[in-house]
Image (cartoon, helix red, strand yellow):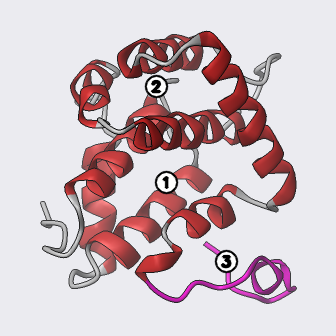
């Protein structure tokens, strides 16, 4: 497996692992989710490896071997209140945009269980969770894609195409 860049903080790597775990919590990772995670891994965490190595790393991170029990391992690593809120917000956004075909609700039962596990592991109050979910919903309405939302989180790590550029016909795509 490719090793993340030495410049990546442990907190950001934990955040990427958590997002992979949440994406997988319903038993599959959609092609869109997988491409997004591969781009993030290569661009920000493993810039010095090939695209196929980054894809292999993401595949390993989202494999069944990394089940929802990893949430129990990762949640305590988010020690600051801001980190906890960010982890919950981005996780909520991942499960909201990764809806499976045939799901009747916005979040399927397995995702709800993983999300509840994360909420409990982070120790956030129900009122905080409601505020975070509201903020996440507002963020999703503002951005055209989860790609743009996560890009804003990792913007300090380097150049990123704007939403306008991503939305242009023939523009950059994942």
Q: Is residue 127 visible?
A: yes
Q: Is residue 107 above or below residue 162?
A: above
Of callouts 3 and 1, which one flags the residue occurring earlier in the amino acid sequence? 1
Q: What is the spatial separation of the Cα atoms under label 2 and label 3, in whole angstroms? A: 25 Å
Would you call the spot at circle 1 few (<14 residues within 10 Å), some (14-19), or many (20 or more)? many
Give the CA separation, mark 3 to mark 1.
Answer: 13 Å
User: Which residue is located at x 80 percent, y 17 percent?
Assistant: 105
Residue extending furthest front? Answer: 81
168 within the magenta span: yes
Residue 11, percent from left and from top: 28, 51
Q: Which mark is residue 93?
A: none
Q: Where residue 157 sits: x, y (%)?
A: 41, 79
Which secondary structure lies at badge 2? loop
Q: Which residue lies at the image location 78% right of the left edge and 23% below the top edge?
A: 102
- Position of residue 108 relative to residue 30, above or below, is above
Q: Residue 168, percent across and down? A: 85, 85
Q: Which residue is pictured at 65% across the width and 40% down the height?
A: 93
Q: Which residue is mark 1?
A: 34
Q: Nearer the viewer, residue 127 or 110?
A: 127
Answer left or right for 49 relative to 158: left
> Would residue 100 be visible to someone looking at this image?
no
| For residue 84, above or below residue 58 | above
Would you identify the image quadrant in which residue 20 lies? top left
Q: Is tag 1's residue or tag 2's residue first in the polypeptide sequence? A: 2
In depth, the one of 43 and 85 nearer the eye is: 85
Disc on res. 173? 3
Q: Quadrant of the C terminus?
A: bottom right
Q: Secondary structure at mark 3?
A: loop
For the record, the magenta segment spans 158-174
């Amino acid at each position: 497996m490719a090793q993340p860049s030495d410049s990546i903080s442990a907190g950001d790597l934990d955040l990427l692992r958590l997002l992979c775990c949440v994406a997988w919590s319903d038993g599959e990772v959609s092609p869109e989710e997988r491409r997004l995670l591969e781009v993030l891994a290569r661009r920000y965490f493993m810039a010095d490896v090939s695209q196929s190595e980054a894809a292999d790393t993401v595949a390993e991170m989202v494999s069944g071997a990394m089940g929802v029990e990893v949430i129990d391992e990762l949640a305590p690593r988010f020690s600051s209140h801001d980190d906890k809120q960010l982890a919950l917000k981005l996780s909520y956004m991942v499960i909201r945009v990764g809806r499976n075909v045939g799901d009747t609700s916005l979040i399927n039962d397995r995702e709800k269980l993983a999300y509840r596990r994360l909420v409990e592991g982070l120790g956030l109050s129900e009122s905080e969770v409601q505020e975070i979910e509201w903020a996440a919903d507002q963020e999703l309405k503002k951005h055209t894609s989860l790609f743009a939302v996560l890009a804003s989180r990792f913007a300090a790590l380097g150049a990123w195409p704007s939403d306008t550029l991503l939305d242009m016909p023939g523009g950059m795509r994942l």
